[in-house]
Image (cartoon, rainbow, N blue to C red):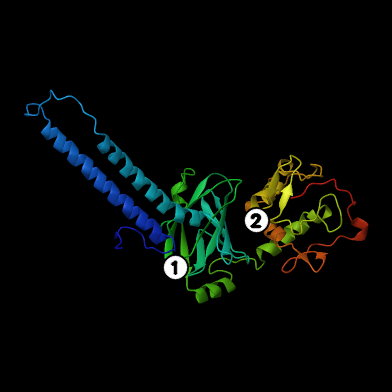
């Protein structure tokens, strides 16, 4: 299908589907606008004052005509709905299992990106072409909206809630990154660039830690582990029965709360448990965990989540498999074997 020259390039796997939907809606709008305008003009002339039309004829219903002009728009509307629902559900649905995850934090007035291996960027995002990318987004202050016109990707970025979107960037090049939600007086300056690179060039860029920033060569898991150590989280969340249960194998598990509700231990659950532990008290434990609100930035919360997510049972020993180690607790400092704590 030929493209309208004013539209940005179709640089992602979803771009063509949304463009086709746009063309269909545009053509339908032009057709019905022209039809309505033509009928208005025809009736205005045909039944104008002074015409020979016999106005003494009473009104006679046209059931077939009324059904026709009701059914046709209904069919068109349902067809467009189902046609649009498929790419919408894919864009905001589950990403492919091999998708590369990048964490995005919106803040007044910049975009901050964290790659899993520790590379960080501000207002710039580098991605490999042909690789599925999953973005996990959250805002540090107000509602923002992540928008890359060339990808036809748009996702609200909400404080206190993780949202996701995925796509496959296809064409190497540089594309505009915008915030499409008014977020304050300097909203218009909240722009950036998405650079799509050939896979080999991207790996070179990634290995160098980014082209412009001096980055810490710690992965997100390692950074989260360092925070876990610094705040002595192990004193409650150690291996042995303690004031709070172990965090091993927590991520992705269904947790029963004191309220009787069952929640999935995902990003939102872990974040809420860190910042507002009283909201989701695990069944069998007391709400004694202090809130860490104001002590962790959103970047640090993401790093802690990455660390907790990496903790799995291995070879019969509760501990992280690779890239992370649960700090050990000296026997003399081991927590009491009583279940009186809460967890994130």
Q: Secondary structure under badge 2?
A: helix
Q: Position of residue 249 (x, y in %)?
A: 74, 59
Q: Is residue 213 visible?
A: yes
46 up-or-down from 253: above or below: above
Taking the image as shown, residue 183 lies to the left or right of residue 140, namely left
Q: Which residue extends farthest top?
A: 56
Q: Is residue 183 above or below residue 314?
A: above
The N terminus: image quadrant: bottom left
- Give how far across and how far down residue 35 sits, in percent: 22, 43
Up the image or down, 113 lies above or below 173; here it is above
Which label belongs to residue 273? none
**Relative to the observer, which residue lies in front, 187 or 283?**
283
- The x, y position of residue 67, in whole percent, is 30, 38
Q: Judge by depth and name the residue closer to the eye, 136 or 123.
A: 136
The answer to whether 33 appears left or right of 105 in the picture is left
Residue to which mark 1 is pinned = 170
Q: Name the front one of labels 2 and 1.
A: 1
Question: For residue 116, which quarter of the picture?
Answer: bottom right
Q: Where is mark 2, residue-wise? A: 302
- Residue at coordinates 55% horizontally, 60% vertically from top-left? 95
Residue 243 falls left or right of residue 120? right
Answer with mark 2 or mark 1, whichever residue precedes in sequence: 1
Can residue 191 be seen here? no
Locate residue 88 relative to residue 164 in the image: left or right: left
């Amino acid at each position: 299908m030929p493209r309208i020259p004013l539209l940005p390039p179709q640089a992602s796997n979803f771009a063509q589907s949304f463009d086709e939907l746009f063309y269909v809606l545009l053509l339908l709008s032009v057709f019905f606008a022209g039809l309505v305008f033509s009928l208005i003009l025809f009736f205005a002339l045909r039944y104008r004052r002074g015409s020979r039309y016999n106005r003494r004829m009473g009104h006679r219903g046209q059931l077939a005509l009324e059904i026709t002009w009701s059914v046709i728009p209904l069919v068109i509307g349902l067809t467009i709905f189902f046609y649009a629902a498929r790419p919408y559900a894919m864009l905001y649905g589950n990403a492919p299992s091999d998708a590369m995850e990048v964490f995005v934090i919106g803040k007044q007035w910049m975009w901050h990106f964290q790659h899993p291996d520790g590379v960080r960027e501000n207002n710039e995002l580098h991605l490999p072409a042909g690789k599925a990318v999953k973005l996990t987004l959250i805002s540090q202050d107000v509602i923002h909206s992540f928008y890359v016109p060339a990808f036809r990707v748009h996702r609200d970025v909400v404080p206190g809630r993780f949202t996701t979107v995925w796509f496959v960037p296809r064409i190497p090049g540089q594309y505009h990154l915008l915030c499409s939600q008014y977020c304050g007086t300097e909203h218009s300056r909240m722009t950036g660039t998405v650079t799509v690179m050939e896979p080999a060039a991207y790996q070179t860029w990634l290995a160098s830690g980014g082209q412009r920033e001096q980055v810490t060569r710690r992965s997100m898991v390692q950074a989260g582990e360092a925070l876990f150590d610094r705040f002595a989280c192990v004193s409650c969340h150690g291996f042995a029965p303690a004031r709070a249960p172990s965090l091993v194998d927590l991520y992705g598990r269904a947790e029963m709360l004191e309220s009787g509700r069952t929640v999935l231990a995902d990003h939102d659950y872990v974040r809420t448990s860190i910042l507002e532990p009283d909201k989701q008290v695990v069944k069998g434990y007391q709400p004694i965990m202090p809130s860490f609100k104001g002590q962790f930035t959103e970047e640090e919360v993401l790093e802690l989540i990455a660390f907790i997510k990496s903790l799995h049972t291995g070879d019969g020993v509760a501990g992280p498999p690779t890239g992370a180690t649960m700090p050990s607790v000296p026997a003399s400092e081991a927590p009491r074997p009583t279940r009186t704590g809460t967890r994130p």
